[in-house]
Amino acid sequence: MLLSALPYAAWSQDTVEKRIEFSPGSSGTTIEGRIQGHSSVDYLLGASEGQRMTVDFTTDNPSAYFNLMRGNDPAALHVGSIAGNRFDGALPASGDYRVRVYLMRNAARRNEVAYYTLRVSIAGQSAAAAPPSGDFADGLSGGPDWWEVTGLAANDTLNVRTGAGIGNSVIGAFGNGDRVRNLGCAMNGSTRWCRVEMPGDQPVRGWVAGRYLVEAAAPPVNGASGSIPCAVSQSQPMGRCAFRVSRGSGGTASLWVALPAGGERYLDFREGNLVGSDPGKATHQERLGDLNLIFIDGIERYEIPDAVIYGG
């Protein structure tokens, strides 16, 4: 859900890749740059697990942001449009990290320009996480493949962090009943932390407090098919389009709608909210009772009942 801003940055096809190098004896650097329209810049730098990275981003364009990713992993550790223009946290693994600077879709379509300053630093020695042990090893070492989030107070959520400890940045949240894949646990002092993943087209991956996890089976596959009201041009009256849907829990759903001229329109929902569609498509959602009115590029129109998204 917190990754809804990521796809546009990943879709840009005019991306320049640059390697960051620190001066001898220095633990950081400052970069000044410029992007325009659909262009973006990926800054790569290597770091070790347990080191602390700080990224500060300033710009003259409020629609410019940065995302932080581990190598080519599409699951962002930091999404600037949601979490802000600063990242400060311990790194979960050794390897390359990617700082992507980009313009949001609305500004890119207007071919806007953004001048920016990027300050990146790495501090601390590498510190390998304590190996998993006991009954909370990862799935390959005898522990469960899946956890279920439990024990939270009513209306509370479980923070997902970039590293094993409360000093690390929050990048997402889970609720009671969410099923997450077990990627291994470690002790930080007397507290057990587990690295987990919420699978999906935009996976959320990070560390959570282990006391809120219990062993669980894999989440059930929940799918359906049918037809919904649709129109793909402004002058076209509403007709019917076939769809197929794959559901998770709590209003998470991936929906594919068959287009009259061929192909499919993809719609991605989190907590019942539309968070993404096909690359380059502008989306808008309105609610009318238990009906979701979906608009794509201001032209295509779809009427999707809550029952399609949540089941029932």
Image (cartoon, rainbow, N blue to C red):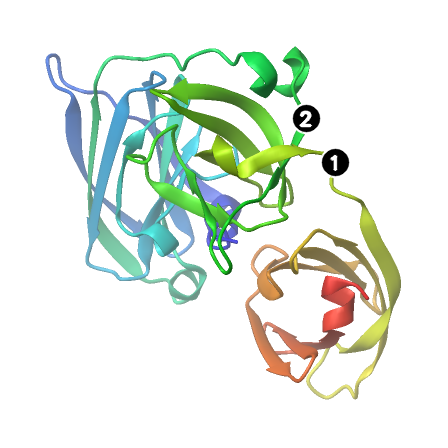
Task: Tell me the quadrant of the picture where the C terminus can be found.
Answer: bottom right
Q: Is residue 81 left or right of residue 252?
A: left
Labels 2 and 1: the sequence-earlier one: 2
Q: Are marks 2 and 1 in contact (CB under 8 Å)?
A: yes
Report x, y in % for residue 296: 62, 71
Label 2: which residue? 145
Q: Is residue 157 left or right of residue 37?
A: right
Depicted 300 relative to depicted 235: above or below: above
Q: At 44% across and 29% down in the image, what residue appears?
A: 70
Report x, y in % for residue 247: 74, 54
Q: Is residue 23 visible?
A: yes
Where disc 2 sits, the SS reads loop
Label 1: which residue? 218
Viewer-closest of 160 and 154: 154
Label of residue 120 in the image: none
Q: Is residue 308 left or right of residue 21?
A: right
Report x, y in % for residue 175: 55, 51
Q: Amino acid at mark 1?
A: Ala
Depicted 189 relative to depicted 8: above or below: above
Q: Amino acid at mark 2?
A: Asp
Depicted 237 relative to depicted 208: above or below: below
Q: At 40% across and 15% down in the image, what residue appears?
A: 129
CA distance for labels 2 and 1: 8 Å
Q: Is residue 71 visible?
A: no
